[in-house]
Amino acid sequence: MRVLPLLLTLWVLMSWGPALGQPLKVGDLVPEQTLVDAQGQPVQLSQLRERSPSGLVSITFWCSTCLSCRTVEKALADLTLRTQGRAVVIAVSASKGETAAQVQHFLRSHALPLQVYFDPQGKLADLLGVRVTTTTIVLDKDERVRYWGRFSEGEKAVSELLSGQPVTTPRTSQFG
């Protein structure tokens, strides 16, 4: 009879791993998170997913002052345009204190058609275990992490998922 309480306790600990400071892994369900858009309005991850017929959301952590971000932002903009109407591709500003006005100025001056959201307290980054910019996370229609790591492989993961294929490389190291 003591097995049931032990199993229940283990289930609770496994379900609440992110709340206990353990980052999510590939295959884990992402609990609802709130980002802020450029107008200062809250946006739920589920709302972004609903904007895509495939339910795919690609999130790349980025900022306007990051040198490694310069190496991927053209490809990120290209992915945004290539998947328009099929997946949602966003950048999340990872620089504490970066303002929407600064980001919009940067995007205009570099002619980058990126959708940038803000994670003011870094909750999403912490939940996903993101430590450096250009880390990309791809979520499927069920809000599960299907890819985590470098942008180049994340771009490939989006293409694979959109074509109905499994992700061949679900995790790579962070680079940024």
Image: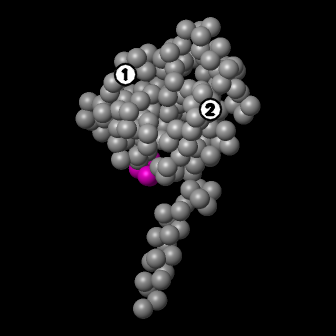
Residue 59 in the image: state x and y as whole percent: 50, 33
How is the model colour-coded? one colour
Q: Which numbered dot is residue 160?
A: none
When the figure is inspected, residue 60 is found, relative to residue 170, above or below; the finding is above
Residue closest to the far left: 164
Q: Earlier in the sequence, mark 2 or mark 1?
A: 2
Q: Which residue is mark 1?
A: 84
Which corner quadrant of the image does residue 153 belong to? top left
Query: Considering only vertical position in the picture, is 78 above or below 128?
Result: above
Would you say residue 166 sits in the magenta stretch? no
The CA span between labels 2 and 1 is 23 Å
Q: Could you say which quadrant of the image residue 161 lies in?
A: top left
Q: Nearer the viewer, residue 149 or 77?
A: 77
Where does the image place residue 37, in percent across and percent down from the top left? 57, 31
Frontmost residue, 48 versus 129: 48
Amino acid type, callout 2: Gly
Query: In this image, 35 relative to 26: left or right?
Result: right
Can residue 167 be seen here? The reply is no
Residue 7: quarter of image: bottom left
Residues rendered magenta in the picture: 25-29
- For the point 43% across and 43% down, which residue is it? 46
Residue type of the residue flagged with mark 1? Gln
What type of secondary structure mainly makes up the magenta span? loop
Q: Secondary structure at mark 2?
A: loop
Image quarter in which the C terminus is found: top right
Q: Secondary structure at mark 1?
A: loop
Q: Is residue 71 visible?
A: yes
Disc 2 versus disc 1: nearer the observer = 2
Q: Badge 2 is on which residue?
A: 40
Residue 168 vs 109, above or below: the answer is below
